[in-house]
Image (cartoon, rainbow, N blue to C red):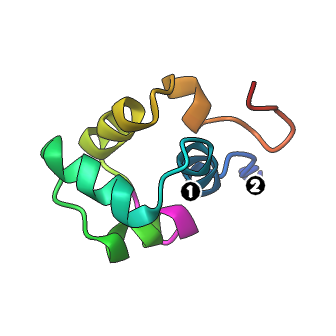
Amino acid sequence: MQKVKHDVSLGANIRTLRNSCGLTQEQTIAKLQLLGCSLTRGSYAKIEAGIQNISVQELLAMKEVFHADLKDFFRTADEDYG
């Protein structure tokens, strides 16, 4: 049986992108809610922790809030955010 290698940590990448924008979780949630996402801070924290899945709508809204490319969300541990 082959095991799947989990080399992408979406939650950690989201946290890195948020921090690089200088935003708190609360500020991020406020911006996401203005874009139509109904996330709470608790739900957002679970996404960053890798406990909760993210919807496509939420991902696209975060892309806009963080001024990021989609590829930035899927970086592996050995790639640099440049």
Question: How many residues crowd mark 2 within 10 Å: few (<14), some (14–19), many (20+)?
Answer: few
Left or right: 13 as drawn, with respect to 34: right
Q: Is residue 4 left or right of residue 34?
A: right
Q: Is residue 25 above or below residue 14?
A: below
Where 40 falls versus 53 (above or below)? below
**Residue on which disc 2 sits:** 3
Residue range highlighted in magenta: 48-53
Q: Is residue 35 or residue 71 the one in the foreground?
A: 35
**Which amino acid lies under the numbered mark 2 shown in the image of this protein?**
Lys
Dominant secondary structure, magenta: loop
Residue matched to label 1? 11
Q: Is residue 76 above or below residue 44?
A: above
Q: Is residue 30 magenta?
A: no
Residue 52 visible (yes or no): no
Looking at this view, name the residue that lies furthest to the front.
Answer: 22
For this rendering, which residue is in front, 43 or 28?
A: 28
Image quadrant containing the C terminus: top right
